[in-house]
Image (cartoon, rainbow, N blue to C red):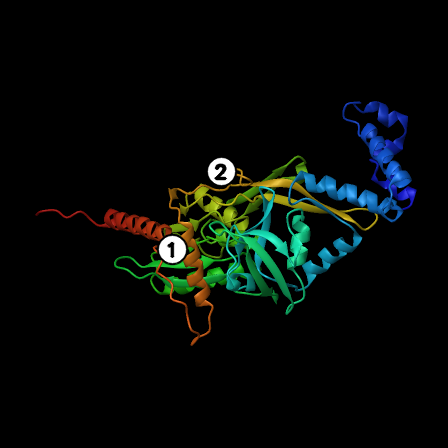
Amino acid sequence: MAMHRWFMLIPAALALGGTALAQEDEDVSPYKEMKTLARAVELIRQDYVDEDKTEYEELIYSALRGMLEELDPHSDFMDPKDFKGMQEDTRSEFGGLGVVVTRKDDRLVIVAPMEGTPGFRAGLLPDDVLLEIDGLSAEKMSLRDAVDKLRGEAGTSVKLSVAREGETEPIEYEIEREVIKVPSVRGAKILEGEGPRIGYVRVTQFSEPTGKEFARALADLEKQGMGALVIDLRFNPGGLLGSAVEVAGEFLPGGALVAYTEGRSAAAARRYTAPGKSGKPRAYPVAVLVNGSSASGAEIVAGALKDSGRALLVGERTFGKGSVQSVVSLPDGSAVRLTTAEYFTPGKQPIHKKGVAPHVSAPMSSEDVVRLLALRRQEELPDGTAREKIEPVEDIPLQRAVDALRGVLLHAKEGTEEPSGEG
């Protein structure tokens, strides 16, 4: 990297001469620290044993990577090649496993495998810790590098080694990548049982068609006489914000606040409101199931319906992923991905690192979670495929949600009946 490219990193105020510098508070000026960095770079170039590793560009890029990675797991630096690759990814399809990964307690952890994807079918579970990817240790791997290694051309395979709670030895997987295109709205049905007809629908992620898929599922259940609804957002790792806003908007009046963001700059402040439907929003009672693997968009939906008083939340506190990343290009074609804001629920509750608390706590044991996901995997098998015998799961969160909804419907019915009298 030529010396003139290094000077592009110096803030504009430093290039204005002594007058601009004199106006800055000496305690907050970056000039002293920039000199320290420049001196360290020159020492490395002068004395480091391996001259091939002392190019200006490589040293400055390494410094930027370290600086961004120290901020949080979601901020990072992309050199021109990485930035171009990210832009191409957003415009095209790519192969992957269908798992959402984050850094938690200094470890790479699977938030949730999305239903219908290779990772889900292979048996990966929420909270699995990535130990190795294709034989490379994941201990020091950045989140971006891990995601890049999990992605790849459809039809190719990736080998994983994971640690799982309750297992003494690492579990090995070899999984073939696929283009991830699966329905995000699943299991829509009227639940069995006496009394009012309770509908159930599961939203496994928020992709581009989720809003329309969800609306169609609701319309079908309404034709079947549904009087109340359970929305299952457990193991939903999030996805597109716009789709999450659409789903929440099915039950909120147009213009109602779904979520908002705040950051240090005025530009980071945004409000996301329900789009409004041609008719009135759906008014029947709703319960939402959440757990520790409900993240991002799932938390936005849960928080909006909770704070608006529109739904009862049942389950466990959600994951707590509620930050906004902005990508800013730099003059040499590289870019910085920087966390610039955080999401809040309509009731001014922060989502990031806090999660959304349910009204009714209904945790599931780890054994029941494993069986529940195994039963869902069996739903993916083609007809006629031999199925492993799995013990039925007592889905306590679902039972509590159904009981609560039936109680609401019964109370509403009693309230509308005319009192009897004696003549």
Position of residue 347 measured from the top left corner of the image (x, y, whole percent): 49, 38
Labels 2 and 1: the sequence-earlier one = 1
Residue at (78% x, 41% y) in the render? 63
Residue 22 shows in this picture: yes
Q: What residue is rendered at 60% in x and 58% in y?
A: 160
Is 33 rendered above or below residue 389? above
Dots 2, 1 in contact, CB < 8 A: no
- Front residue of this view, candidates 251 and 23: 23
- Which residue is rendered at x = 50% and y = 61% of the image? 123
Q: Nearer the viewer, residue 314 or 172?
A: 172
Q: Residue 347: which numbered mark, if any?
A: 2
Q: Is residue 282 visible?
A: no
Farthest-out residue, front: 168
Amino acid residing under circle 2: Gly
10 Å neighbourhood of mark 1: few (<14), some, or many (≥20)? Answer: many
Write down the residue under mark 1. 229
| 116 to the left or right of 265 | left
Label 2 element class: loop
The secondary structure type at the circle numbered 1 is strand
Instruction: Indicate the position of residue 198 as horizontal and vertical percent values.
Output: 34, 57
